Amino acid sequence: MQRKFVLAIFFLTASLPLFSQVAPAAMESGLQRWTVGAGFSFFSPHFGDFHLAGGTLWIDDSLNLRQMPEALRGLSIAIEARDLSLDRTPKNPVLRVDTAGGGAIYNWSHYKKFRPYVDFTAGLGNIDYITNGTNRYHQSRTVTGIGGGVDIKAFRSVWVRADYEYQFWPNFWITKVGSPNGAALNPQGLTVGAIYRFGSDRHGY
């Protein structure tokens, strides 16, 4: 299954330049500051001493507003979705963590070949798991995440992205029934993938 996912990412990355070449002029204008991509994630779910793997999708849209101060020209809107359900252990064969949300990403575009960045996202998180070997649970939370990474130029508009994220799932571990507060769940992990940048702005993003 992991091989199929890696192959899907490869074909997606390979097809993006072709798509940009055949896109109508109106579509190219609308996508000229967009970034889309996909990656493969390795996360510690903070749910036992093991890891989960799965796929991640990214969409960024540069604000590129002239009235913004120079220092904020690297600010973009970020959308991210992740599904972690691979590499599960026999102790928790149903364990699955998925998140989807949006926020902001800030890129330092002072370098031609690589772009460091930081980001903040908020959205919905879902987790499926079992306890005591038989009881199955599903929980949903408003999840926030902070992280950062670097984009490294591979060729033309294709970049390689290495990303780290630390998440906050509030009040996950409730110590007793009716308790208003509980310990947070804090998954964290790395994602490596490829992104495609449509066009460029005055900073060469």
Image: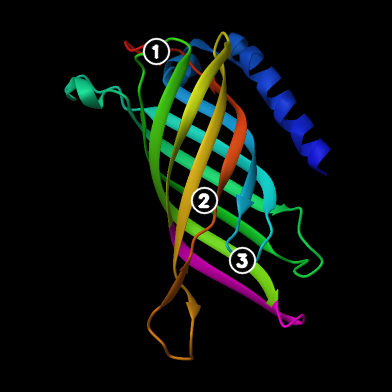
Q: Residue 195 is drawn in which quadrant?
A: top right
Residue most toward the bottom?
A: 177
Q: Main secondary structure of the magenta part?
A: strand
Q: Position of residue 153 (x, y in %)?
A: 54, 14
Q: Residues within 10 Å of mark 2 (few under 14, many from 20)?
A: some
Q: Nearer the viewer, mark 2 or mark 3?
A: 3
Residue at 43% from the left image edge and 21% from the top image edge: 115
Q: Is residue 56 magenta?
A: no
Side of 168 where 104 appears, left or right:
left
Q: Earlier in the sequence, mark 2 or mark 3?
A: 3
For the residue marked with disc 2, what is the amino acid?
A: Ala
Q: Is disc 1 placed on a helix, strand or loop?
A: loop
Q: Nearer the viewer, mark 2 or mark 1?
A: 1
Residue to which mark 3 is pinned: 47
Q: Residue 90 is drawn in which quadrant?
A: bottom right
Residue at 44% from the left image edge and 54% from the top image edge: 123
For the residue marked with disc 1, what is the amino acid?
A: Tyr
Q: Earlier in the sequence, mark 3 or mark 1?
A: 3
Task: Check the image and report above or below for 72 versus 84.
Answer: above
Stretch of the chain drawn in magenta: 131-143
Residue to which mark 2 is pinned: 100
Residue at 75% from the left image edge and 69% from the top image edge: 92
Work out which quarter of the rendered image holds the N terminus and state it.
Answer: top right
Residue to which mark 1 is pinned: 111
